[in-house]
Image (cartoon, rainbow, N blue to C red):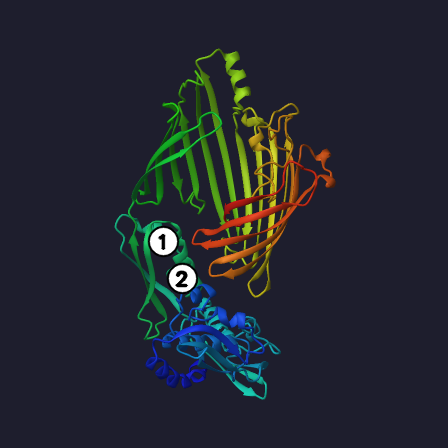
């Protein structure tokens, strides 16, 4: 019987008691004797629902379920064991609630015992084994609080390290002995013999060629066995998007052969896909619009991993007036390996023939291409892209066409982009540790031609620190600058910087911070600075709270930078966690007195701002 099992063996009598009184309900849950672990922390690991005032009001109190309470005892014991209290004893006792037979207060009584620390770590292994390296893998050092869970995790880390060196049959045992309030740890390591990968067999392939799997694998026949190579191979095969199920198994390991054969089984996804959607909305030119889109694609053309997709969009004005106003056709080709290297490349071609409408009795035709390539160099990702566009206006003289371009802000954009980012967050949707950095650059126009000529750089860095329990400090700094490559070149407002809103400076209207025209129209600026910090913490169930401080500004040019122009806001919010990320409701208060027309506001947004 393990440590955890011995700590809860006594609960059988309590389980029998509750079984005989299975209709008892719990009005309150209390903890007694927990001097070194807060009730809040213990309450988080309970399986039994914690009664709330609403449950009591509507008489929906949770049932005293024996299985749930047994699991509670296991979880509470595990919390203490992880904190070094190896002698902990936990009992559960029901007490009649206000004299009622069928309602109880459930009290978890804790006898914490002594707290144990690591005295030393001894190794029993061959001289060829680098114990200094192994000691760094176990996560425990002399003087640390002892945790049997960390010890087991360390044992697995040692095995995986040896397995990556080819020692598939390594035997790693970890034990400990208590001496007063100290623990002496002993590791016994028997590496065994070096093992090599043998024959690799593929099963389940129907439409996919074998070489496609081979090029994704980190395991090769004749190479040393590696646990990490198997895990990486599985991840890379899933990344192709071609398979629903992937298993990588070793055959005949019981006899401990020098070479192990590998069997890779897959279940392929359907190659073809299609879809359609209808969206309703509006814009500054039309009150009510409807957009119909349809797409068709193939994710494994000729069995080589390339994919293609065709897409068509049609937009119409509806209700107040009925007419077609725009259409667009797209074709994209995706190549996962380029020039024999794993560099995913995507080419998108689009064509907008344009339509004459009652508002605009001319036709604006667009043709363009977008090429992008991604290079993964964990934890860094590089993305290189190029965009080419041509715009022609038909139905009016050439001089009128130029005037229409100016009035409607039609800019022909041709550019080259490069982005590098490093993401070491533990969870991209709800990070609690790690950091995220990204630098993106654009070179627009120049030798490429087009109407705009500028260079742009935008840099962001975010850091996440666990302050206390699940209280997370998240901070972000962002800076960016745009410079013209031709002195008289115009830059479209959509390519300039603007701030304000749920993801930049909360409390301000969306994209309301920055240079404006006399009528209040946002022109955008060429320099941006943002600095934000917030504390995120759990509230109840899937709800999290947030308190934040945002500051920043957008200036027209570098010479216009003035710290006194910086806008500052603060506020609070609530986030509800979903499988797609948090949905935020936040209230921002403007602290600076530079914008008398803005009084702060509420924001609703999906995902954290950083």
**Residue projecting furthest to the bottom:** 180
Dot in front, 1 or 2: 2
Is 203 or 126 nearer to us in this picture? 203
Task: Assign a secondary structure to mark 2.
Answer: helix
Answer whether labels 1 and 2 touch (C-beta < 8 Å). no
In this orientation, does residue 171 appear? no
Give the Cα separation between the discs numbered 1 and 2. 13 Å
Q: Judging from the image, what secondary structure is the residue with disc 1 in?
A: helix
Residue assigned mark 1: 214
Q: Is residue 308 left or right of residue 165?
A: left
Rendering coords of residue 256 (x, y %): 35, 74
Residue 288 is situated, as x and y percent measured from the top left of the image, at 41, 29
Which quarter of the figure has residue 472? Answer: bottom right
Q: Rate crowding at label 1 as few (under 14), some (14 to 19) or many (20 or more) other CA atoms within 10 Å.
A: some
Q: Where is 270 relative to 399, above or below?
A: below
Left or right: 222, with 488 as reference point: left
Q: Which residue is mark 2?
A: 230
Closer to the camera in the image, 498 or 177: 498
Q: Going from the N terminus, do you reach mark 1 or mark 2 first?
A: 1
Q: Is residue 139 above or below residue 563?
A: below
Q: List x then y, in percent, for residue 389.
A: 48, 27
Could you say which disc has been placed on residue 454 in the image?
none
């Amino acid at each position: 019987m393990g440590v955890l099992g011995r700590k809860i063996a006594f609960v059988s009598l309590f389980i029998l008691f509750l079984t005989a009184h299975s209709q008892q309900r719990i009005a309150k849950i209390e903890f007694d004797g927990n001097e070194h672990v807060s009730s809040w922390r213990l309450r988080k690991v309970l399986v039994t629902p914690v009664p709330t005032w609403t449950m009591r009001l509507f008489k929906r109190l949770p049932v005293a379920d024996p299985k749930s309470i047994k699991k509670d005892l296991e979880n509470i014991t595990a919390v203490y064991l992880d904190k070094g209290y190896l002698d902990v004893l936990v009992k559960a006792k029901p007490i009649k609630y206000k004299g009622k037979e069928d309602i109880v207060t459930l009290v978890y009584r804790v006898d914490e015992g002594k707290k144990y620390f690591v005295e030393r770590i001894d190794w029993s292994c061959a001289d060829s084994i680098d114990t200094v390296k192994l000691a760094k893998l176990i996560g425990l050092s002399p003087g640390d609080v002892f945790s049997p869970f960390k010890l087991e995790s360390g044992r697995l880390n040692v095995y995986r390290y040896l397995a990556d060196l080819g020692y598939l049959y390594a035997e790693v045992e970890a034990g400990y002995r208590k001496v007063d309030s100290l623990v002496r740890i002993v590791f016994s390591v028997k590496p065994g013999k070096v093992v090599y990968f043998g024959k690799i067999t593929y099963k389940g392939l129907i439409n996919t060629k074998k070489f496609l799997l081979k090029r994704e694998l980190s395991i090769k026949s004749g190479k040393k066995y590696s646990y990490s190579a198997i895990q990486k191979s599985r991840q890379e095969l899933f990344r192709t998007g071609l398979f629903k199920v992937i298993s990588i198994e070793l055959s005949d390991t019981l006899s401990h052969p020098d070479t192990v054969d590998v069997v890779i089984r897959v279940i392929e996804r359907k190659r073809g896909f299609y879809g359609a959607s209808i969206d309703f909305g509006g814009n500054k030119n039309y009150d009510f619009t409807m957009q119909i889109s349809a797409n068709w694609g193939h994710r494994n053309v000729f069995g080589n991993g390339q994919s293609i997709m065709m897409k068509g969009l049609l937009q119409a004005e509806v209700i107040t007036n009925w007419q077609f106003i725009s259409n667009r056709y797209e074709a994209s080709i995706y190549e996962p390996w380029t020039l024999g290297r794993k560099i995913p490349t995507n080419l998108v071609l689009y064509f907008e023939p344009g339509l004459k409408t009652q508002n605009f009795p001319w036709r604006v035709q667009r043709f363009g291409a977008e090429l992008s390539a991604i290079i993964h160099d964990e934890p860094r990702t590089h993305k290189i892209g190029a965009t080419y566009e041509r715009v022609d206006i038909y139905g009016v003289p050439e001089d009128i066409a130029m005037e229409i371009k100016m009035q409607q802000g039609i800019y022909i954009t041709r550019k080259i982009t490069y982005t590098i980012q490093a993401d070491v967050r533990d969870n991209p949707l709800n990070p609690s540790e790690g950091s995220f950095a990204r630098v993106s650059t654009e070179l627009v126009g120049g030798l490429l031609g087009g109407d705009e000529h500028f260079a742009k750089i935008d840099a962001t860095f975010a850091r996440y620190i666990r302050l206390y329990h699940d209280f997370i400090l998240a901070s972000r700094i962002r800076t960016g600058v745009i410079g013209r490559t031709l002195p008289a070149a115009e830059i479209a407002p959509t390519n300039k910087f603007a701030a304000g809103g749920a993801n930049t400076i909360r409390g301000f209207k969306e994209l309301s911070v920055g240079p404006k025209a006399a009528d209040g129209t946002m022109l955008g600026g060429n320099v941006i600075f943002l600095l934000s910090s917030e504390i995120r913490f759990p509230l109840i169930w899937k709800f999290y709270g947030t308190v934040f401080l945002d500051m920043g500004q957008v200036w027209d040019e570098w010479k216009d930078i003035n710290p006194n122009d910086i806008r500052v806001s603060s506020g609070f919010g609530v986030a509800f966690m979903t499988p797609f990320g948090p949905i935020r409701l936040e209230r921002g208060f403007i602290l600076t007195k530079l914008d008398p027309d803005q009084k702060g506001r509420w924001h609703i947004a999906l995902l954290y701002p950083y």
